[in-house]
Image (tube, grey):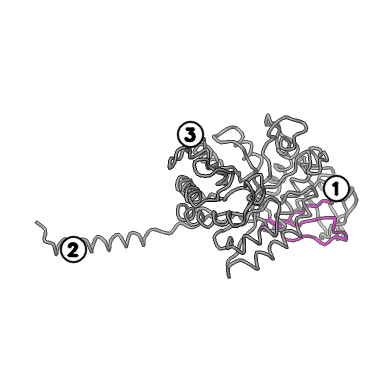
Amino acid sequence: MISSKSTVSHRVIDGFLVLLCIAAVPAIAAVPLPKLNIPNGFGVNIHFTGEPVDLDLIRDGGFKFVRMDLGWGGIERERGTYKFERTGYDALTQGCMKRGIRILYILDYSNKLYESDRSVRTEEGRRAFAAFARAAATRYKGKGILWEIWNEPNIKQFWTPQPSVDDYCKLVETTAPLVKKADPSGLLVAGATSGIPFDWLEGCFKKGLLEWIDVLSVHPYRSQPPETVIKDYARLRELIRRYAPKDKKIPIISGEWGYSNINWNKARLSDEKQAQYLAREFLINLYQKIPVSIWYDWKNDGTNPDEREHHFGTVMHDLAPKAAYTAAKNLSHNLAGFSVDKRLDLPSDKDFALLFRKGNREAVAFWTTQDDHDVTLPLPPGRGLLIDMLSSAKAPAMPSWKEKGLTITASQSPQYILIDQD
């Protein structure tokens, strides 16, 4: 029989060993946002679960992210019971991991078990939503998922009966610490605003939003060309600097942004124009140091010729590729691994030329927001491979220039020059 003194001694020793084991286990660090190299941060919004052939096409198009709703009401249909496998999220998560595609899951929308409207406005609802979010983060932990709280809470379509800075911030404050604890590998994303509503965001910042999150997401939709976002990012960064906790850097991601063939002003965009906007959106976001750019949408959501929502896709409803898919694939494959070094100085601010680097290699992406015209790119004498937005090479495929500066025709379709190494 062991004496009580001996039992205490063993307990002390066992407790000491447990502490040693805990200390020996390395802390799980959050997987950081991708480096600003093509195509690390390129992604698409999807509207499916499971593991369909879409995932292969997404991977082959050079997309490295998908963004998908993880709807509370569909997962928790009985209080405290969460059905992830039945709803296809297990298969989707595993399918993305196999293909090297990173996931942004949107923890979103309401649940009639707790709330009467498409929002979360009660204390009971907040606790239940946070518990659901923790369950999701626990199930898919260790995969570097971006956990986004809600989608576009600043508009009535997604937060009824009326958007509320106060209610949304209470939801984030309640949910964020539980998700972070459940999945230390993930990043907590919030905002997810329709457009870049500065007053709304400042209201959230005043409530403490930037204290609870890792990443701020915005959806910079506009009827104007992508380049018009530059001034908005500058203004948003200044707002973040004013309210962010000391020494905390809050990156901005473009969590949802695309152009339908039926634009917001009801103008019709050709497939080529949509492709131009996709390539330029991704390029401008890289230039503005936006590490994740998620295009809305992966595929056309229907076939109604007059329904805007049915024409955002990079592929048709039957998965036939549109010009936007080809543009994304060409950019991703031809400039893979390159990152923006600087914008080259041209006489007109309507002309864009971005110098890219990968090790000791250089490339240039150039285009204009005006009609076709000649530009002179300030480059030292050299030669290179000229690539069109929608094809692998463009005649003359190997331009050379003996004098400083290459004079070449710029169009609204980005072109790429892979400069030869000496």
2 vs 1, front mark: 2
Q: Could you tell which of marks 1 and 3 lies nearer the N-terminus?
A: 3
The numbered dot on residue 8 is 2
The amino acid beneath tag 3 is Arg
- Callout 1: 10 Å neighbours few (<14), some, many (20+)? some
The amino acid beneath tag 1 is Ser
Q: Between marks 2 and 1, how big is the CA–CA gap?
A: 81 Å
Q: Position of residue 241 (x, y in %)?
A: 65, 67
Residue shown at the point (51%, 53%) measured from the top left: 175
The span shown in magenta is 339-368
What is the secondary structure assignment of the residue under circle 2? helix
Front residue of this view, candidates 399 and 237: 237
Q: Tell me whether the residue at label 2 lies in contact with that at label 1, contact meaning CB atoms closer than 8 angstroms.
A: no
Residue linked to disc 1: 411
Residue linked to disc 3: 86
What is the secondary structure assignment of the residue under circle 3? loop
